[in-house]
DNA sequence: CCGTATCCATTCCGATACTG
DNA sequence: CAGTATCGGAATGGATACGG
């Protein structure tokens, strides 16, 4: 049977996963955040088959995470750009990267994975704060509702 | 062919997705963060088939995201608890929820989705800060490396 | 109540070949 | 280069039936 759609879910986490929960999708977004624009660029870097990449790009455009623009150079093809909505996934990628770095051993090519381009400052740990400004951590916090 | 494994990837984002990128997996983690412990509880709430739930729970235990403990009450069965490692996924869930709330319309049962249990304070927007303390946003920041 | 095992249709994914 | 078309094996997901 078909996979259940979560697009109409009451939970915003579920709605988000419905859009970007497919295999490869968030890696495509990651590469776009890194500045990749072209089909072949993505295809080579990810090692995904062109078939699947086409499907994912289509879906991401349909969801307005990406948009197609005419290539900056003369080539008659198009480029894929993140929309404002797509850039909203930035914290998700940061959180995923942070988890992996802290919990899943691997030799990262560069230990500092996130750099602010403006002043070259390294990026600090992602923080979740309560209304009073205190930083929360999952250890000392229990949620009553996590929709 | 079989889906490509990303467990050995140099990128921590890819390594994380390799573990929690499967359909249903992060929703299971979400429910565990919300306090769910029992198989049937998860099964009913998610609407996932028992078959798949079994597989996902197995994988999560193998990855040490969840651990099985004897049930608190008399029942001879076991409960699934998040490990410390598993609680490390907290920011990922927060980021996903935030994206969904801001970008994917839906009627959430409760607009305030995250509550600090200690003092009942609502949780503020998730922030990513540079080393100098300045809050970064994807709009004004470009990354040179986002592994 | 807590799963496990089996079945089956559907979907997924990668490889390959092909088009403009 | 940027896809599209097709194919086959694998995995998915739901239903059901079955044990502890």
Image (spheres, coloured by chain):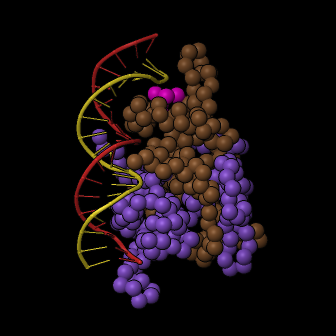
Chain colours: A brown, B purple, C red, D yellow
Q: Residue furthest bottom?
A: B74
The magenta region covers A38-42
Membership of B104 in magenta stretch = no
Residue at image coords 47%, 46%: A22
In this view, B60 is above or below A87: below
Residue B83 falls left or right of residue B118: left
Q: How many marks?
A: 0
Q: Position of residue A24 (x, y in %)?
A: 46, 43
Membership of A39 in magenta stretch = yes
Q: Is residue B79 visible?
A: yes
Q: Position of residue B36 (x, y in %)?
A: 51, 73
Which part of the image, by quadrant, shows the N terminus of chain B? top left
A67 vs A32, nearest the viewer: A67
In this view, B97 is above or below B62: above
A109 vs C14, nearest the viewer: C14
Q: Position of residue B137 (x, y in %)?
A: 69, 49
């Amino acid at each position: 049977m078909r996979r259940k759609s979560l697009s109409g879910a009451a939970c915003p986490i579920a709605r988000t996963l419905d859009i970007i929960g497919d295999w490869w999708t968030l890696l495509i977004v990651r590469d776009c955040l890194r500045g990749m624009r072209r089909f072949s660029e993505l295809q080579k870097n990810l090692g995904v088959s062109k078939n699947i990449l086409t499907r994912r790009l289509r879906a991401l455009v349909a969801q307005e995470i990406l948009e197609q623009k005419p290539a900056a150079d003369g080539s008659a093809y198009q480029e894929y750009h993140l929309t404002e909505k797509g850039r909203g996934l930035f914290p998700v990628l940061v959180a995923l990267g942070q988890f992996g770095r802290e919990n899943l051993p691997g030799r990262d090519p560069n230990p500092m994975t996130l750099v602010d381009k403006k002043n070259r400052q390294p990026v600090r740990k992602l923080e979740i704060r309560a209304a009073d400004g205190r930083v929360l951590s999952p250890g000392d916090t229990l949620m009553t509702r996590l929709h």
